[in-house]
Image: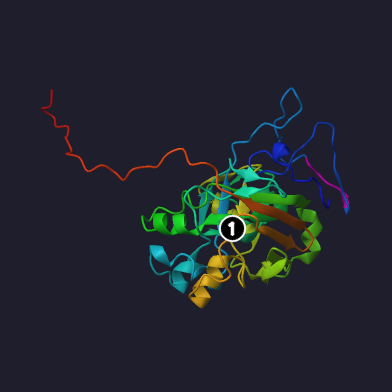
């Protein structure tokens, strides 16, 4: 069911492009698509979709793409890296459309992109095996995980994972391509060898194959559901591809910030074979209302059992 829905911000239900419009029964290029097993997407009385209580999980992709990015939190060995498909939770409330502007976040001087593909969940499940996890994926879309590298670098030293360096914008689009469209492209290990390219101002920065992921999507979903739950509308990112999938990777290789960080006016375009192209222009930062002062070092009064 190729190119099911175009990604416009007002019709995307919190990082979910899988919208079921009342009365619509999509038909795949390869025959009828069975929607009966997938969860319903709530629709308001006005006919617009309501936000889902869904999450975005972003995985790590390939070792060579990450070694030079997240070393501020300490060295990561290959054993740790490949032991499990580690992920972090991203912000489901700051989605921007496939062709919308993205504002530099307040306080950021090192804005970066991350070229990824995302799997969208269409069926709820808990502690899924890989076969059930594969069946839970309703489709795929392009995912740009925008990153404020200077903010991220500082907060990663705390050891809690990314916060303001990651929660200001994510792009999904331009289509949700249903999973049945890629069945014939899966290799024997379950990977999708789709070409991926990112360009800034029409100059190619990086290109890779999606099949260079450390784990196939089915295993990412299975791991995310382990002792937990995945629900319709959840989005799982592949992790940033290698070979120039983000500027930080290239900075780490060369020891210099070349190519330079993104600036207002730059246009970032990402193309994935079989899915399409997203294109976003960087614009100036929003006005920052206030600064947060450092923590106050104050006397600590403690409660005791004899306290009044």
**Towards the viewer: 8 or 32:** 8
Q: Is residue 256 visible?
A: yes
Residue placed furthest toward the bottom: 254
Residue drawn at the location 78% of the way across and 46% of the way down: 6
Residue 8 falls left or right of residue 114? right
What's the magenta region?
Answer: 31-35
**Towards the viewer: 247 or 303:** 247
Q: Is residue 191 visible?
A: no
Q: Is residue 82 above or below residue 144?
A: below
**Residue that label 1 marks:** 263
Residue drawn at the location 77% of the way across and 64% of the way down: 273
Q: Is residue 16 above or below residue 83?
A: above
**Colour approach in the figure:** rainbow
Crowding at label 1, few (<14), some or many (≥20) Cα neighbours within 10 Å? Answer: some
Q: Position of residue 258 (x, y in %)?
A: 56, 71
Q: Position of residue 84 (x, y in %)?
A: 50, 63
């Amino acid at each position: 069911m190729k190119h099911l829905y175009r990604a416009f911000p007002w019709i995307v239900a919190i990082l979910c492009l899988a919208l079921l419009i009342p009365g619509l029964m999509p038909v795949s290029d390869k025959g009828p698509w069975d929607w009966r097993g997938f969860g319903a997407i709530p629709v308001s009385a006005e006919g617009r979709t309501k936000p889902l209580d869904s999450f975005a999980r972003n995985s790590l992709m390939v070792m060579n793409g990450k070694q030079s990015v997240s070393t501020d939190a300490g060295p990561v060995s290959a054993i740790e890296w490949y032991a499990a498909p580690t992920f972090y939770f991203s912000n489901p409330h700051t989605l921007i459309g496939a062709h919308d502007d993205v504002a530099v976040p307040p306080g950021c001087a090192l804005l970066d992109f991350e070229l990824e593909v995302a799997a969208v969940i269409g069926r709820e499940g808990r502690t899924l095996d890989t076969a059930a996890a594969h069946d839970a994926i309703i489709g795929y879309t392009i995912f740009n995980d925008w990153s404020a590298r200077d903010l991220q670098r500082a907060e990663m030293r705390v050891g809690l994972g990314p916060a303001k360096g990651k929660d200001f914008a994510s792009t999904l689009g331009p289509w949700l391509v249903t999973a049945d469209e890629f069945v014939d492209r899966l290799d024997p290990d379950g990977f999708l060898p789709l070409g991926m390219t990112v360009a800034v101002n029409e100059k190619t920065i990086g290109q890779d194959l999606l099949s260079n992921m450390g784990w196939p999507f089915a295993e990412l979903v299975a791991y995310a559901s382990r002792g937990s739950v995945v629900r319709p509308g959840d989005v799982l990112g592949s992790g940033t591809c290698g070979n120039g999938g983000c500027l930080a990777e290239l900075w780490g290789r060369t020891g210099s910030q070349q190519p330079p960080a993104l600036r207002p006016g730059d246009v970032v375009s990402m193309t994935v074979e079989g899915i399409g192209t997203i294109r976003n222009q960087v614009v100036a930062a929003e006005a920052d209302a206030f600064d947060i002062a450092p923590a106050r070092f104050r006397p600590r009064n403690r409660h005791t059992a004899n306290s009044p």
